[in-house]
Image (cartoon, grey):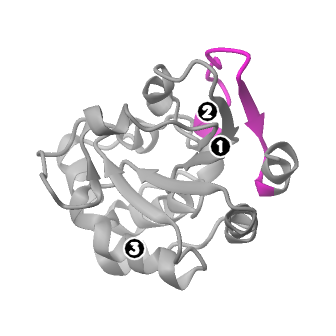
Amino acid sequence: MNIYVDFDDCLCETARAFSKLVYDMFEIDVPYEDMHYFNLQKSFQLNDEQYAQLLVKGHEADELLSYEETPGAAAVINEWVGKGHQVSIITGRPFNAYKPSRQWLDTHGFADIKLYCLDKYGREQKMKDSGFSLELEDYLQMKFDYAIEDSPSAFRFFDHLPDLNVLVFDRPWNQRAELPTANYRRCLGWDEIRAIVP
């Protein structure tokens, strides 16, 4: 079985860290529970300059390495690997965040899992032949049985897989989102995901 797993807010608590970071940088207080938009600029009501600064700071190595693991993620994913399932972490993080992202995975129990960067949000320049940056056409050749994703903005990347089972990791910014098909199911955490994926 092939399984797609998103990185931020599926494997680690990125939004909680960004909530603290925005307060530290700009004294803007938006608790995690009040982050009702996946668009961070909108959730935090940042101007363009503040948003640009946040994206740079939030993807610095020290920040990325400080993010807490989402409870249960490593245990469940390693169970899948033990059963012979193929797991791919496909992140929308910028390409230059690959090295600390790989380091975070290696130190949190995900050392055997492949990590790919895909420009999910139209922010990246093309990076050829890196071994980890996926061109869209290459991604579209990949086949998955299950996907774990929190971002409604990323659902469009599943349109080419009509039989894909999408487990939507419940977060404040996706609670109002309409799930596209009956193949999409909301999950409250990794214990629930474990119970669904055979």
Q: Which residue is mark 2?
A: 174
Image: 165 above or below 113:
above
Residue 8 appears in the figure:
no
Tag 1–tag 2 contact (CB < 8 Å): yes
On whether residue 126 falls in the magenta region, the answer is no
Q: Hey, which residue is sitting farthest right in the picture? A: 195
Image: 3 above or below 75:
above
Residue 162 appears in the figure:
yes
The magenta stretch is 172-190
Image: 101 above or below 153:
below
Disc 3 to disc 2, how far (Cα)? 26 Å
On the rendered structure, is 121 left or right of 15?
Answer: left
Kindly state the secondary structure of the residue where label 3 is placed. Answer: helix
Give residue 193's position: percent from left, percent from top: 78, 48
Kindly state the secondary structure of the residue where label 1 is placed. Answer: loop
Badge number at residue 73: none
Give residue 159's position: percent from left, percent from top: 48, 19
* N-term-proximal mark, 3 vs 2: 3
Badge number at residue 171: 1
Amino acid type, label 1: Arg
Amino acid type, label 2: Asn
Which residue is more in the foreground, 33 or 81?
A: 81
Total marks in image:
3
Which residue is more in the foreground, 104 or 78?
A: 78
Q: Which residue is mark 3?
A: 102
Amino acid type, label 3: Arg
